[in-house]
Amino acid sequence: MIQAGNLREKLKSARSLRQTLLGAFGVMVVALTISSALSYLFNLVMNRLIPKADYGDLYSMLTIFIIALTGAQSIQTVVTKFIAEFEAKHEREKVRVLVHTFSRWLLLVGSGIALLCIAIAWPVGNLLKLDSPVFVIILGASIASTLYLTLPFGILQGKQRFLGLGAVNLGNQLLRLVLGIVLVKIGFAVYGALAAGLIGAVCMSLIVVIQYRSLFSGGKPEPVPGFEPIDTLKYMVPVIGAMFFIILLSQIDVLMVKALFSRTQAGNYSYAALAGKAVWFFPEGILLVMFPRVSELKAKGEGTRRVFLLSVTAASIMVWAVACFYLIFPKFTAWFFAGEKGRTNPTVVGLVGLFGITMALLALVKLIAFYELALEKKRFIILFVVGGFAQVLGILLFHKTLKSVVFVMLIVAIFLFVSNLFLALRAEKSAVESGAQALP
């Protein structure tokens, strides 16, 4: 009877875990999908509303903004990780110290970026052949505000307030789109399009700060024994390393193809790459849920394997469904991402399916990497270094055709997936033991 009771409790616990996770997965996947659609719509609408010559200036500024945003994500990862752990241990004062410290740091860094952009606005404007150096100044303010927004995002993600996180993501993109249209329509052109992102980030930051004003209000909190906020930056090193090689593995091929092939071939490859790399973003919502959940369970000394396996399973269903669609309907896929010139191009049609499989594997590799980061494991970065160099060297040696380039990427992706999955499953046991020992 006791065994039967224990079994019922375990089954009930498993059902509860699955429902909670799947619900959170659903919220974040839907929110990020709509956010991505709004971001794409923003670029499409701006392309229509802003004269072609001026849109080149906007595109240059947005490219720099995206690069800066990618780097800023490492800050959100660190904030999420430590807030999730402190919440798990009910160490609320540490959360307040962390938020106060990062708020101060980000305001200082953001101010420095804004001042730097003012100082370099004229030379950068001349270098990029911009109509006005004011574009660079607005860009600097946008980067600074978005950098600060990583703190409110990190608070929501660390506290696992996924409805709020999804709403803020949606609100940011929706406000950017609406304000961008209004400001451009009334005559501000590129200035309005850039300012829309700045205003959206500031408004969303204010909403979260007001919601969690108890963490921001008051003077500087008293130091907490055994906790130095500066120590959290040590965790940022492996995060930055992992993100660098993830970006390298998913982006370097386009640059190398441009250098190694003709302009026409490079153009064909970029169309296929655009389709294939769309797969990359599908599991992002699952990753945002898994990371704080695993960090919390590790802090409590509890097992994380069920969360990990459910996350990998959910992400696999998504990416393989899209990859299979690419394989079955390559002409439609090529048309969707490149128009009629893609559908009628046999090179593009022949690459999209293979690209979909490759990027599906790399998307899962990214998910596994963040699982290992949540467990504070770093050995997997060695595999990323090996994979990165192997991909670059492989493309240099075996680039007879465009398809051979994708095959090199596929081989590296398979190696990284199998090796990282093996490391992740082994890492779980030791992480649970270290988490249990850390509990008071």
Image (spheres, rainbow, N blue to C red):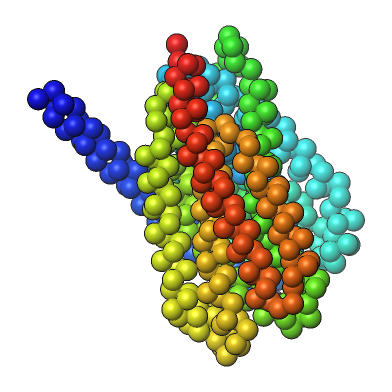
Q: Compare residues 342 and 58 and report the one nearer the observer.
A: 342
Is residue 29 rendered to the left or right of residue 343?
left
In the rendered image, the residue lying farthest to the bottom is 344
Between 119 and 92, the one nearer to me in the picture: 92
At a point 51% along the width and 61% down the height, the residue shown is 360
Residue 191 occupies quadrant: bottom right
Q: Is 188 displayed left or right of 279 in the figure? A: right
- As drawn, 241 above or below 130: above
**Rendered location of residue 275, percent (x, y):** 56, 72
Residue 224 in view (yes/no)? yes
Residue 177 at least partly seen: no
Task: Reply above or below: 138 against 369.
Answer: below
Q: Residue at x 75, y 60 (%)?
A: 392
Q: Position of residue 36 (x, y in %)?
A: 51, 60
Q: Residue at x 71, y 39 (%)?
A: 110
Depth check, front residue: 74 or 277:
277
Residue drawn 47% across and 16% down?
A: 437
Residue 256, given in percent of the width and then of the height, sits at 76, 67
Work out which quarter of the rendered image holds the C terminus and state it. Answer: top left
As drawn, the residue found furthest toward the left would be 1
Given the current orientation, which residue lies at the most extreme top position? 225
Relative to 433, is 8 above or below?
A: below
